[in-house]
Amino acid sequence: MNFVAIQMLLGDRAKYLGLIFAVAFSTFLMSQQCSVFAGLMNRTTSQIKDVPDAHIWVMDRNTQYFDEVKALTDDDLYRVRGVPGVEWAVPLFKGLPAPRPSTARSCCHHDGVDDATLVGAPRKMVLGSAEGLRQPNAVIIDRVGYEFFFPKQPYELGKKLEFNDHLVTVVGIYNSSAPFQNLPVFYARYSDAISYVGRERNTLSFVLANAVPGVSDREVCRRIDAATGLQALTSKEFGWKTIQYYIAHTGIPINFGITIAIALIVGAIVAGQTFYIFTLENLKQFGALKAIGVTNWRITGMILLQAMMVAVIGYRSALA
């Protein structure tokens, strides 16, 4: 009977191909929108992933995501260093200075890393090295940012830019993770970075830390929370917290969800209607089978087999 069901399905080639196309198109649209949404959410954590040296991020208690910077005091850095289980802790500055020469992008991401250790500096270098930041007024720029500021020019160190009346020199070019906001990303030493933006009373954005061997990152985060009143998260936790913020406070999930729902509904309606018509047109064949003793359950199984075959082929065609 299964062979008969398959032959009935393949016999009407036009409706069979129509069913395959409806399922494949619906599946393709849903999977494409899901992958774009996942990639977009992954981009929100790009600058967190670009700091592989530190496993713990310490921030203000009310910080909800990476781009929401609530300045800490210098004393907070020393308090974190004094927590049992912390192997080391260093400052990280995050600002949005306006580079010159002026361009269509009025600002960029600018991170300041610890002067002594350079913890937080990028590691996926295209040209130059992180050690170049030890030079005065030195910056490292991401590859896309370099191509924007110096279009159609070969990668070359020594290029000049101006931040807040400070002339800086490009000493490195690196491959950054794909960012959520399409802005160039610069790195400099902490002492230099804070002078490239308007000065405020408190300039410390985050504290990067690592746990001593033998103590888990989560346990050190708990100790920092209890001892300082600040919020301490592992890199993975901070990344998920950033993603959850964008899911909860932006229209991105709703927009993608509507598209996915429409694709599912339209695909189901078109495929279901076509398969319903196909079944009605084969009532004579099903009647003949019933006349020779085939049970209703067996006929139902044949129809379900046809539906499953169309669904699997259509799904695999969309993902191929």
Image (spheres, grey):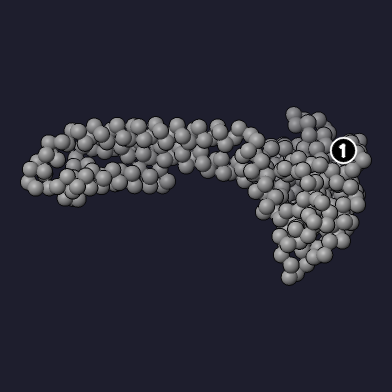
- The kind of residue on which mark 1 rests is Val
Q: Is residue 90 visible?
A: no
| Residue located 55% across and 40% down the image | 36
Please, is residue 162 above or below residue 134 in the view? above
- Left or right of residue 48: residue 293: left
**Residue 101 position within the rendered picture, expressed as x and y whole percent measured from the top left:** 82, 32
**Residue 108 position within the rendered picture, expressed as x and y whole percent measured from the top left:** 77, 37
10 Å neighbourhood of mark 1: few (<14), some, or many (≥20)? many
**Residue 235 position within the rendered picture, expressed as x and y whole percent measured from the top left:** 70, 54
Residue position marked by numbered label 1 in the rendering: 197
Please, is residue 177 above or below residue 83 in the view? above
Nearest the eye: 215 or 150: 215
- Left or right of residue 214: residue 138: right
Residue extending furthest toward the left = 292
Please, is residue 190 above or below residue 95 in the view? below
Q: Secondary structure at mark 1?
A: loop
**Residue 128 position within the rendered picture, expressed as x and y whole percent measured from the top left:** 78, 53
| Residue located 21% across and 36% down the image | 279
Q: How many marks?
A: 1
- Left or right of residue 239: residue 259: left
| Residue located 11% across and 44% down the image | 289
Q: Is residue 84 visible?
A: yes
Nearest the eye: 271 or 188: 271
